[in-house]
Image: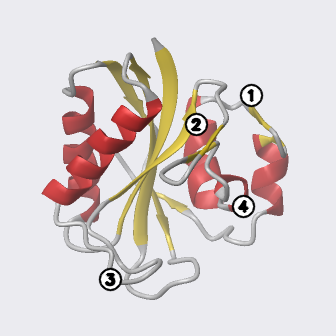
Amino acid sequence: MILAYIGMGANLGDARGTLLTAARELSALPGVASLVLSRFYRSAPVDSSGPDYVNAVAAIQTSLDAHALLDRLQAVENRHGRLRPYRNAPRTLDLDLLLYGTQAIADTRLTVPHPRMHLRAFVLRPLADLAPDMQLPQGGLPQLIEACADQALQVLPD
């Protein structure tokens, strides 16, 4: 089993409800043994426009290889009406494979660790909920969060 982390976000429709439903769908996937979900955070769009996002991170134990997991993530996005009309377009659901164990993968379909996660507080803060002592190649989570431009995150109540 591999420990993988998935960034989750939405800013169209019932964003929080969509993330909860997507988490249930992810936990039910064949090859996923467990799922732990961070708190939910509200953040303004980065390099985009539209309503605020609701973000979270899911930690899963999986027997799926990274590309099979990516395929499953994209299938869940598609079931929730995900469209990709342009880069950083508002979305009903965004699922990003952030980390896949300790593996580094870089091909035409997938780059892991996610290449911009260390720059995004909306990814790092929920990741820190699940793994506060995690070290990324760029440094520890507290230092990386401190250096992020997008500091205006709001923790949503349970």
Please name the residue that numbered disc 2 is placed on: 99
**Image height check: is 131 above or below 124?**
above
Left or right of 146? Residue 65 is left
Which amino acid type is shown beneath numbered disc 4? Leu
Pointer 4 residue: 119
Q: Nearer the viewer, mark 4 or mark 3?
A: 3
Q: Residue furthest front?
A: 108
Q: CA distance from mark 3 to mark 1?
A: 37 Å
Sequence-wise first label, 4 or 3: 3
Mark toward the start of the polypeptide (3 vs 1): 3
Sequence-wise, which precedes: disc 1 or disc 4?
4
155 vs 64: above or below: below
Quadrant for residue 126, please give it.
top right
Q: Label 1, label 2: how many angstroms apart (C-alpha)? A: 15 Å
Question: What whole-number distance in Å separates the C-alpha atoms at marks 2 and 4?
Answer: 15 Å
Q: Nearer the viewer, residue 11 or 156?
A: 11
Tell which residue pokes out farthest to the top in this image.
1
97 vs 87: above or below: above
Image position of 63 (left or right of 47): left
- Give the residue number, with chain letter if any, for mark 1: 133
Query: In 3D space, how far apart are the residues under numbered discs 1 and 4 (Cα atoms)?
Result: 17 Å
User: Which amino acid type is marked by label 1?
Assistant: Asp
The residue at 64%/49% (across/down) is: 124
Task: Give the number of callouts.
Answer: 4
Colour basis: secondary structure
Residue type for callout 2: Leu
Residue highlighted by disc 3? 85
Give the side of residue 79 with respect to residue 18, left or right. Answer: left
Whole-percent x, y for residue 79 in the image: 14, 55
